[in-house]
Image: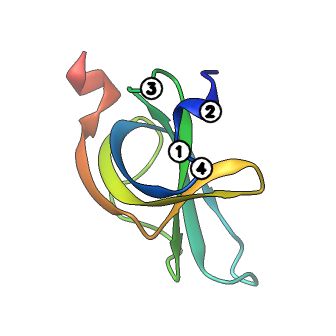
């Protein structure tokens, strides 16, 4: 994994990468959907995109390429963007 220090600890960022995995919480938990995205630049850095109040985001799943932007902060040691703006760019297989 790339050095996470290549990312700022706080501030507005934009990036693009592919969704490595998603996390969907059970119905008994507060609605929340998150996607771990491996960035293209800085190479192999990871960012968690977290949508509160959502159980699913249509079209976002493992292997999907995303462009995104938002305010970056570190939550539990993981660079995280809450409720980012995003655009689905395609799937990893389609771009190769």
Q: Name the spot of residue 23 as percent of width and height, x first.
A: 63, 56
Quadrant position of residue 57? bottom left
Q: Name the spot of residue 83 as percent of width and height, x first.
A: 44, 70
Looking at marks 4 and 2 on the same chain, the residue that comes earlier in the sequence is marked by 2
Residue at (44% x, 26% y) in the render: 42
The nearer-to-camera label among 2 and 1 is 1
Residue at (60% x, 21% y) in the render: 2
Q: Name the spot of residue 22 as percent of width and height, x first.
A: 57, 51
Looking at marks 3 and 4 on the same chain, the residue that comes earlier in the sequence is marked by 4
Marks 1 and 4: CB-CB under 8 Å? yes
The image's colouring method is rainbow
Give the Cα separation between the discs numbered 4 and 2: 9 Å
Residue at (63% x, 24% y) in the render: 3
Q: Name the spot of residue 27 as percent of width and height, x first.
A: 69, 81
Determine which residue is flagged by label 3.
42
Give the Cα separation between the discs numbered 3 and 4: 14 Å
Give the Cα separation between the discs numbered 1 and 4: 4 Å
Residue 8: mark = 1
Label 1 Cα neighbours within 10 Å, binned few <14 / some 14-19 / many ≥20: few
Does residue 65 sit above or below 86 in this rendering?
Answer: above
Q: Give the position of the C terminus as an image quadrant.
A: top left
Residue 4: mark = 2
Residue 67: mark = none
Q: Give the position of the N terminus as an image quadrant.
A: top right
Determine which residue is flagged by label 4.
9
Give the Cα separation between the discs numbered 1 and 3: 11 Å
């Amino acid at each position: 994994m790339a050095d996470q220090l290549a990312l700022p600890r706080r501030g507005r960022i934009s990036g693009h990468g592919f969704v490595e995995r998603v996390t969907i919480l059970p119905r008994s938990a507060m609605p929340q959907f998150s996607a771990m995205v491996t960035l293209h630049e800085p190479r192999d850095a990871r960012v968690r995109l977290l949508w509160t109040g959502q159980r699913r985001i249509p079209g976002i799943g493992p292997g999907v390429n995303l462009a995104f932007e938002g305010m970056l902060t570190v939550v539990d040691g993981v660079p995280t963007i809450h409720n980012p703006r995003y655009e689905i760019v395609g799937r990893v297989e389609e771009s190769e």
